[in-house]
């Protein structure tokens, strides 16, 4: 016996230990199963006028259904619903009462789709999947029926479309406020107040153009090797003598229409120019490479810094000096005239200022591909000190990529100093701009008081008199519209959703209030009568544009209503309903949120929570019947 025990001791201990563990866990398992059974039969909430009891098992069912819909990314009233089984229960209850829940949706799926769903959701029972889809589509139909209940009348569509797509041909005089010298100087208090109010505002962001935040600015230097210098060097070199030309002629490069070589004949011009151009291109590339090598040699001991170079404090003294480099180039290439060095270091340059420098504004680099060929201004704007660019790596103190021009000249440029965008340190930096803005504002206030007299002059004497009196011009005729039917037609073809696109007005852009004023004024005239048959003084009016400090003097010339064919086309596609009645549709969507929101449905169904929908349910703790319990009824949906 002892021999048997010793021989099989490990197996006996394993079996005995397993039995002991089972005996130890059985009471806990029984208790847990009992508690879960009690939880499933417990009351979660009451609903309806008769306070019908809703079991906790229904809560578990709702949580499982929401988890399935969440995995399938099928929200009904937004993501909030996905965490609220009580809300889902009430929506399904209402849809079911309306007879909208039903059908066997799983029969419409292929076996592969059913298997995919069974793998995706936690409950692989096909009946559960089918019931969940039935509930989902029932709720979706209920909400869809509510949304489509509002009908848009043909009259409303025509009235709105007739205004939205009405085009008016106009002629205008634009009177802009100016900082005139004859205006009184603003007081120091006014200047300081204006400066403080707008010192950190970008002028491009303010409709009146007020704003004194300084843009990114830089100082630069550049070295130019004109192609004409290289050409003159080659023309005077032995590489273009008679022997070289004759060899080139006899070699007769492919695709060159050289005449036959004949003894004693002078070198043809086509041969001379071909060899000259070839040598110039070779020398140009050699010069570019020589200069680039000097820059690269100076960078070798510098440490990289996120694609840029970490520059030492004495870098201004160590970097390659452009004027020294010019001398080195002439030594390396005898006969080449000294390259041209230029710099602007006595004033700050904006990106626009750099585009106005004639010597470099037509230069570019193809280092970044043919589709992106930035010039000096664009390169400076991408500098590390101004925010940087992950592709175009430019920084202060480091020579940028070689530039070329349309005449094949070479330009090397470098940023020598930077001043990133910032508010002015003091008023004196922008005093002139502040004073000019205050004078513009004063001038507009005067113009605003003269609106009636301007309109009278325009009606009595015509637009030309107004233009001459206010130092303006009569603009070319232009078409004014709130939206464009051709743009909407494009939307029909592409299926894209575009915002309304008002016509741009000279000097003030697509200013919708002004455009609406012009269109509404045109619509006061009969559409069946040409506007030109109506006296000009009746078609002439003034529109002050306070936001732009501008007075628009408008004469209506002709109008083009929306034709019936285009109207029918847009209505049949549903675009007018979405474009023109956006606010009505938004109101409908807001009404949906209100009609089927959780709090609304709780009141409508007299829903009262008895137990919180959390793990506390499993401990069989009672929850108070309060509004706080209603809010907590949605927790735990995602498990």
Image (tube, helix red, strand yellow):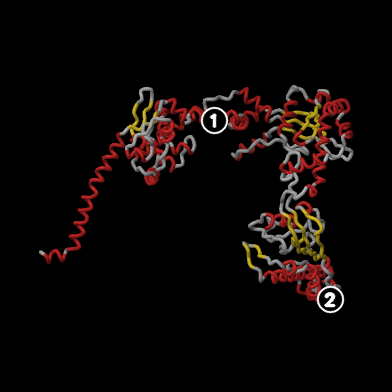
| 430 w.r.t. 180: above or below | below
Q: Earlier in the sequence, mark 1 or mark 2?
A: 2
Please state, as top left, top right, bottom left or bottom right, where the C terminus lies in the image: top left
Q: Secondary structure at mark 2?
A: helix
When asked about the image quadrant of residue 367, the answer is bottom right
Towards the viewer: 398 or 557: 398
Q: Secondary structure at mark 1?
A: helix
Marks 1, 2: nearer the viewer: 1
Horizontal side of 75 relative to 526 (left or right) equals left
| Separation (CA) of disc 1 from disc 2 | 88 Å
> Hey, which residue is sitting farthest front in the picture?
189
- Label 1: which residue? 590
| 342 w.r.t. 74: above or below | below
Crowdedness near tag 1: few (<14), some (14–19) or many (≥20) residues, C-alpha within 10 Å: few
Towards the viewer: 511 or 201: 201
Please state, as top left, top right, bottom left or bottom right, where the N terminus lies in the image: bottom left
Towards the viewer: 302 or 427: 427
Q: Look at 67% across and 54% down and name the residue there.
A: 387
Give the label on residue 242, or none.
2
- Horizontal and vertical percent position of residue 436: 82, 42
Towards the viewer: 56 or 394: 56
Residue 262 in sight:
no
Horizontal side of 72 relative to 160 (left or right) equals left
- Horizontal and vertical percent position of residue 61: 36, 37
């Amino acid at each position: 016996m002892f021999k048997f025990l010793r021989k099989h001791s490990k197996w006996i201990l394993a079996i005995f230990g397993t039995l002991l563990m089972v005996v130890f866990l059985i009471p806990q398992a029984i208790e847990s199963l009992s508690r879960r059974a009690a939880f499933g039969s417990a009351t979660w909430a009451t609903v309806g006028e008769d306070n019908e009891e809703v079991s906790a098992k229904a809560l578990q069912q709702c949580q499982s259904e929401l988890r399935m819909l969440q995995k399938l990314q099928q929200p009904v009233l937004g993501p909030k619903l996905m965490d609220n089984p009580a809300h889902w229960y009430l929506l399904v209850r209402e849809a079911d009462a309306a007879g909208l829940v039903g059908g066997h949706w799983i029969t419409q799926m292929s076996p592969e789709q059913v298997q995919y769903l069974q793998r995706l959701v936690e409950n692989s029972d096909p009946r559960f999947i089918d019931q969940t889809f039935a509930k989902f589509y029932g709720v979706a139909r209920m909400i869809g029926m509510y949304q489509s209940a509002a009908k848009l009348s043909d009259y409303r569509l025509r009235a709105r479309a007739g205004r939205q797509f009405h085009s008016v041909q106009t002629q205008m005089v634009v009177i802009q406020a100016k900082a005139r010298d004859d205006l009184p100087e603003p007081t120091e208090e006014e200047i300081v107040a204006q400066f403080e109010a707008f010192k950190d505002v970008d002028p491009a962001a303010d409709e009146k153009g007020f704003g004194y935040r300084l843009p990114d600015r830089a100082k630069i230097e550049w070295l130019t090797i004109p192609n004409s210098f290289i050409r003159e060097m080659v023309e005077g070199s032995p590489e273009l003598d008679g022997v070289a030309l004759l060899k080139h002629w006899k070699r007769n490069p492919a695709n060159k229409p050289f005449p036959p070589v004949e003894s004693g004949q002078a070198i043809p011009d086509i041969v001379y120019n071909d060899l000259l151009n070839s040598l110039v291109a070779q020398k140009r590339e050699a010069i570019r490479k020589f200069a680039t090598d000097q820059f690269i040699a100076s960078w070798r001991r510098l440490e990289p810094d996120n694609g840029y170079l970490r520059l030492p404090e004495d870098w201004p003294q160590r970097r390659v000096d452009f004027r020294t480099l010019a001398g080195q180039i002439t030594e390396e290439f005898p006969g080449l005239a000294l390259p041209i060095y230029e710099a602007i270091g006595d004033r700050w340059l904006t990106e626009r200022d750099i585009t106005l420098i004639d010597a470099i504004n037509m230069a570019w680099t193809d280092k970044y591909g043919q589709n992106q060929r930035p010039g000096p201004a664009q390169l400076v704007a991408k500098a590390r000190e101004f925010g940087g660019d992950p592709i175009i790596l430019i920084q202060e103190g480091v020579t940028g990529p070689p530039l070329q021009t349309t005449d094949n000249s070479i330009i090397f440029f470098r940023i020598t100093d930077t001043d990133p965008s910032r508010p002015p340190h003091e008023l004196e930096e922008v005093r002139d701009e502040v004073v000019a803005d205050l004078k513009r504002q004063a001038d507009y206030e005067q113009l605003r008081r003269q609106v009636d007299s301007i309109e009278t002059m325009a009606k009595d004497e015509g637009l030309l008199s107004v233009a001459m009196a206010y130092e303006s011009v009569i603009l070319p005729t232009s078409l004014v519209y709130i939206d464009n039917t051709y743009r909407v037609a494009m939307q029909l073809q592409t299926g894209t959703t575009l915002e309304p696109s008002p016509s741009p007005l000279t000097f003030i852009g697509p200013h919708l209030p002004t455009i609406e004023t012009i269109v509404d004024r045109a619509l006061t005239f009969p559409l069946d009568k040409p506007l030109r048959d109506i006296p000009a003084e009746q078609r002439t009016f003034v529109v002050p544009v306070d936001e732009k400090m501008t007075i628009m003097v408008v004469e209506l010339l002709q109008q083009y209503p929306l034709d019936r064919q285009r109207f029918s086309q847009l209505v049949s596609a549903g675009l007018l309903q979405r474009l023109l009645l956006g606010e009505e549709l938004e109101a409908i969507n807001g009404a949906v949120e209100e009609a089927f929101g959780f709090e609304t449905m709780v009141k409508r169904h007299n829903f009262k929570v008895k137990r919180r929908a959390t793990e506390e349910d499993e401990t069989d703790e009672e929850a108070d019947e309060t509004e706080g319990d209603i809010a907590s009824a949605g927790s735990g949906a995602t498990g």
